Structure formats: structure tokens, C-alpha cells
Image (spheres, rainbow, N blue to C red):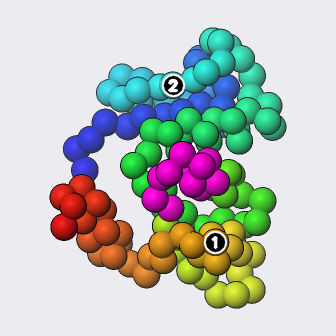
């Protein structure tokens, strides 16, 4: 959409994790912003990713979860978002879909329901313009 990319890392700068994203990281570092709260070279740990998600939530105007299991990092991001008063939206899934149970759970908790991108665009426009 012509905007810059912001990448929030769950490790230190200079660590390509996962390795297959090394070129993507180079592209973002040239034309976007790479953020980390960890020192350069800090290796990723299981606990660093949920902590990273709170920064993603803080940088967001709204959070859209399109797919999430019940143990998904997306749920961490959405929870942090609710705690800091961000709008949270979720795409509904079939009741037994393991990839959608987290989305359905967010909807049960009051997240906005997204059936299509037009719904989100309209909601976001209303929030920005106040009408």
C-alpha cells in the first residue's frame, strides 16, 4: 500500500530468525524499521515472542486476527491490545476448526466480527473520521 514496514523482533538485531527470512529482514532494514527490545545478537527464546507481541499491540491502531489456535501468539497480541484499549477484530471460523478456535474465542469475548475486508475498512474509516 506504499507504506513502510515495521518488524518487531523476538530476538536481537542481527539475528535472522527464522533463517529463511534473512533476505526479507535485509529488505525491511533498508526501507522500513526493525525494532527489538533485546540487545544485538540476543538469541530468540520461547518467552521472547509473547513479550514481543505486547509491542506489536502498542504500535497498532487495531488488531485483526484472521487465524488462531487457542495457544496462538495472535491471542497474546489481541489480549495485550484489549488491555491498552485497542480495537480487536476476528474472522469467524467453523466451530471445530483448530486454526479458528482462537478467533471464535475472541468473538465470544467481544471482538468485532470480520466477514470481509470491506467491513474492516469501513469500521476503520469511521474510527478515523468519527462518522
Picture coordinates of residue 33, whole percent (x, y): 41, 26
Q: Secondary structure at mark 1?
A: loop
**Residue found at x 69% / y 69%:** 102
Q: CA gap, disc 1 to disc 2?
A: 30 Å
Instruction: Give residue 119's quadrant in the image.
Output: bottom left
**Residue found at x 36% / y 23%:** 30
The number of numbered discs placed on residues in the rendered structure image is 2
Q: Secondary structure at mark 2?
A: strand
Residue that numbered label 2 is attached to: 35
Task: Indicate the quadrant containing the C terminus: top left, top right, bottom left or bottom right.
Answer: bottom left
Can residue 79 be spotted in the picture?
Answer: yes
Is disc 2 surrounded by few (<14), some (14 to 19) or many (20+) residues within 10 Å? Answer: some
Q: Residue furthest bottom?
A: 95
Query: Which residues fall within the magenta stretch?
Result: 77-88
Q: Which mark is residue 42?
A: none
Picture coordinates of residue 113, whole percent (x, y): 48, 77
- Magenta span contains residue 71: no
Q: Is residue 10 left or right of residue 1?
A: right
Picture coordinates of residue 64, whole percent (x, y): 48, 61
Q: Earlier in the sequence, mark 1 or mark 2?
A: 2
Pick the residue in front: 72 or 18: 72
Pick the residue in front: 128 or 103: 128
**Residue found at x 69% / y 36%:** 51
Mark nearer the viewer, 1 or 2: 1
**Residue found at x 75% / y 22%:** 43
Residue that numbered label 1 is attached to: 109
Amino acid at each position: 500500500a506504499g507504506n513502510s514496514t515495521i518488524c518487531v523482533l523476538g530476538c536481537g538485531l542481527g539475528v535472522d530468525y527464522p533463517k529463511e527470512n534473512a533476505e526479507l529482514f535485509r529488505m525491511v532494514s533498508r526501507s522500513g524499521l526493525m525494532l527489538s527490545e533485546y540487545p544485538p545478537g540476543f538469541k530468540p527464546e520461547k518467552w521472547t515472542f509473547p513479550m514481543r507481541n505486547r509491542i506489536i499491540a502498542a504500535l497498532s491502531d487495531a488488531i485483526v486476527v484472521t487465524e488462531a489456535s487457542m495457544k496462538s501468539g495472535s491471542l497474546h497480541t489481541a489480549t495485550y491490545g484489549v488491555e491498552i484499549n485497542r480495537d480487536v477484530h476476528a474472522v469467524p471460523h467453523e466451530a471445530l476448526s483448530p486454526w479458528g478456535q482462537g478467533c471464535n474465542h475472541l468473538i465470544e469475548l467481544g471482538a468485532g466480527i470480520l466477514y470481509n475486508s470491506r467491513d474492516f475498512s469501513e469500521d476503520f474509516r469511521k474510527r478515523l473520521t468519527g462518522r
